[in-house]
Amino acid sequence: MKKRTMTDRDIYILGIETSCDDTCASVIANGTNILSNVVSSQNEIHKKYGGVVPEVASRRHIEMIDIVIMEALSIAGKHIEEIDAVSVTNRPGLIGSLLVGVGAAKSICYSKSLPLIAVNHLEAHLYSNMIENPLIEGGLLGLIVSGGHSSLYLVDREWNITEVGHTVDDAAGEAFDKIARYLGLGYPGGPVIDRLAESGSEDLIEFPRPMMESGDFNFSFSGLKTSLIYRTKKHRELMDKGSIPDLVAGFQKAVVDVLTHKTIAAARKYGMERVFVSGGVAANSRLREEFLRLGSENNIRIYIPPAGLCMDNAAMVGCLGYHRLKRGLTDDFEIDVYSRSDL
Ligand code: KG4
Ligand code: ZN
C-alpha cells in the first residue's frame, strides 16, 4: 500500500487569536474547511468602561484560553495528536493579551513537537478572504477596516504586501465606537449603529466626507466624529431617541462613502480587478452593499468574508498559518509579541 505523505492528506491547523479582547481558537483543514471557530467575547465585561481595558482583557484571556482551545478541538472532533501545526497571532495588539495566546501556542508546540507559526493579525484579516477562495492568485488590493486600522494594501502575485494608504487619525471602527459611546449606545459601537441606521434616513443629516478628494489613499475619521459632536451640541434635539437613527445613518453613510470611494479609486489607479475587504467594520451591512454595487459598476470583483469572519477570529489565523506552513515558513520558540507591526 502506498504510504501517505503530508501532501496527499488533509492538513489541520490549530489557530489561536488573543490580540485584543476576544479569546479565539479554531481548527481549520487545508486553510479552507473550518471545523470549528470558537470566539469567547469579552464585550459584556468591557461594556461598562466604554472600551477595552488591557489589564482586564489579559486576565480574562488567561481564564478562557484553555477552555476555548479544548472546545475548538472538541467541536472539530480532533485530538491534539491529529493537529499538524499551531498558528498564533503575535503582532500587533495588546501585549498582555498577545502573551496569553503565544504562551499557549508555545506550550502546545513544545509538548507535542509541532511546528509553531507566528502571524501578523492584519495579514490574517486579509487572509480571511482566502478561506472561501483558497485558489485565488495574488495581484489584488486589500482594505482592512477594524477598530485599530483603516488601511489599503497592494498584494502582488507573490503575496508580498505593500501599504498604499492608512488613517491619519482614528480608524473607522474606532470612530463608530467613540460615537456610540458619546450617544450612550454601548460597546462595540459598530454593530449597534449598523442596526439603528436601518430604521433611519441616511440623507437627512449631512456629514462631511473627510479626505475623499485628497488625491492620496489615506483616511481621516476623527473630524467626522467631531462634526457629529459639534452638531448635537448645537442642536440638542438630534440626541432625542427619535432622531438617533437618522443621525447615525448619516454618519455611517459618510464613513461608507469615503471607504468605498477611495478603495475603488486605488483599485483603478493600480489596475487591480480584485479587492479583498476585511476587518470588523467589513461586517457593516451598508458598507457591504455599497462595495458590491460600486464593484459591479466598475468591473472590480469585491471579496468580503461572511460577517463572522470579518470580526476577530482564529479561523483566519489558521488559514494564514496553513499558507505559511506550505511555504515552509515556521518559527522558533524565540518569537516575541509586538504592540505595533506594519505589514
Ligand atoms: O477586526 P475587529 O474585530 O477587531 C480589531 O482588530 O479591531 O474589529 C472591531 C471593530 C469595532 O470597532 C467594531 O465597532 C467594528 O469593528 N464593527 C463594526 C460592525 N461590527 C463590528 N463596525 C460597523 N458595522 C458593523 N456591523
Ligand atoms: Zn482585528
Image: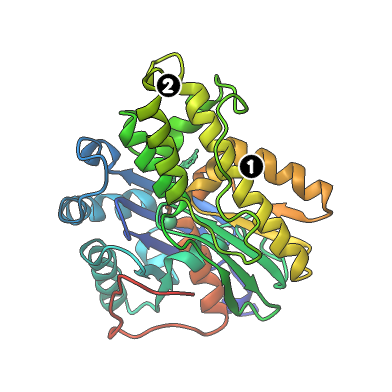
Relative to 171, 103 lies left or right: left
Near-viewer residue (27 or 252): 252
Of labels 2 and 1, the one closer to you: 2
Give the amino acid at mark 2. Answer: Leu
Q: Which residue position is annotated with label 2?
A: 238
Q: Which residue position is annotated with label 1?
A: 288
Relative to 303, 329 lies left or right: left
Q: Is residue 4 visible?
A: no
Q: Position of residue 302 (x, y in %)?
A: 71, 53
Sooner in the amino-acid sequence: mark 2 or mark 1: 2
Relative to 225, 306 lies left or right: right
User: SS of the residue at dot 1?
Assistant: helix
Q: Quadrant of ligand 2?
A: bottom left
Give the amino acid at mark 1. Answer: Arg
- Please name the residue shown 57% across and 41% down the image: 254
Near-viewer residue (257 or 99): 257
- Please name the residue shown 60% across and 28% down the image: 202
